Amino acid sequence: MKRTLACLVAALAVVAAASSRSMAQDDLELGRSGPYVGIGGTYALQEFSGNKPSPDAAWGYNLKGGYRFNRWFALELDWTHLPAFHASTGDTECWAADVSGKFLPFDGIVQPFAAGGMGWHSASDDRFPKDSETGLGFRFAGGVDVYVARNFAITAEAAYLLGNGGGSSYSSLPLTLGVMYRFY
């Protein structure tokens, strides 16, 4: 897993370096306002509490859409689905639908960001004894958008999905690598 993440980070750095030479930043207006959409693959580590057997990490996906109001702030809708945290006694499925504020301190080709928000989180646990929780949860994230063209960016994000249903028994740490398209 560490080797795969290291390769993905190295590839992102190569793309960032190559694209910074081939694009004139002033002509791109990367800090402009407007809507965007994104999709990505997610690998999530679990932070489940309780005395049930601990499940393995899970693969899933992430969908997002948002509106960037100015060069520093965007409002984003985020959907994360993690279909199966596998354990010997059963699987746990989690999803989260959140609204987050996204803060972007720089508007160049490489744009680091921090995000935070809340939404509706759900977990369905098939491990014995079966359990499910649905309710308010929180999302904290940080990452980077690297533009490869005026409207396209590669995104890397680490998030923390905190609790649901009034507790934090189904928290997770999703790591997402994806693409984003910005409308003009």
Image (spheres, helix red, strand yellow):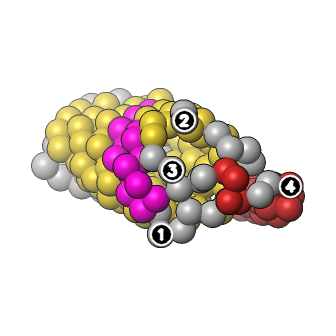
Q: From what the image shows, is residue 149 above or below residue 156?
A: above
Give amino acid for label 3.
Answer: Arg
Residue 50 or 108: which is nearer the viewer? 108
Indicate the secondary structure of the residue bearing disc 1: loop
The residue to which callout 2 is attached is 184
Neighbour class for label 4 at 10 Å: few (<14), some, many (≥20)? few
Q: Amino acid at mark 1?
A: Pro
Q: Looking at the image, do the residues carrying marks 2 and 3 touch, with CB atoms under 8 Å apart?
A: yes
In what element is the residue under mark 3?
A: loop
Residue 108 placement (x, y as % from top left):
63, 63
23 or 75, nearer to the observer = 23
Marked residue nearer the N-terminal end (1 or 2): 1
Is-magenta flag for residue 60?
no
The correct choice, above or below, for 33 with respect to 13 in the image is: above
The span from disc 2 to disc 4 (Cα, nearest Å) is 21 Å
**Dot 1 crowding, Cα within 10 Å, few <14, some 14–19, many 20+:** few
Mark 2 or 4, nearer chain start: 4
Q: Nearer the viewer, mark 4 or mark 1?
A: 4
Kindly check if marks 4 and 3 are in contact, taking CB atoms under 8 A apart as contact: no
Q: Which of the two labelled residues, at mark 4 and mark 1, occupies the earlier sequence position? A: 4
Where residue 156 is drawn, which disc sits there? Answer: none
Q: Amino acid at mark 2?
A: Tyr
Disc 1 versus disc 3: nearer the observer: 3
Q: Percent position (x, y) of residue 123?
A: 30, 36
Mark with earlier residue (4, 3): 4
Q: Which-is-in-front pick, marks 1 and 2?
A: 2
Label 1 to label 3, Cα distance in Å? 13 Å
Q: Magenta stretch mostly in which secondary structure?
A: strand
Say what secondary structure mark 2 lies in.
Answer: loop
Q: Which residue is mark 1?
A: 105
Q: Which mark is residue 22?
A: 4
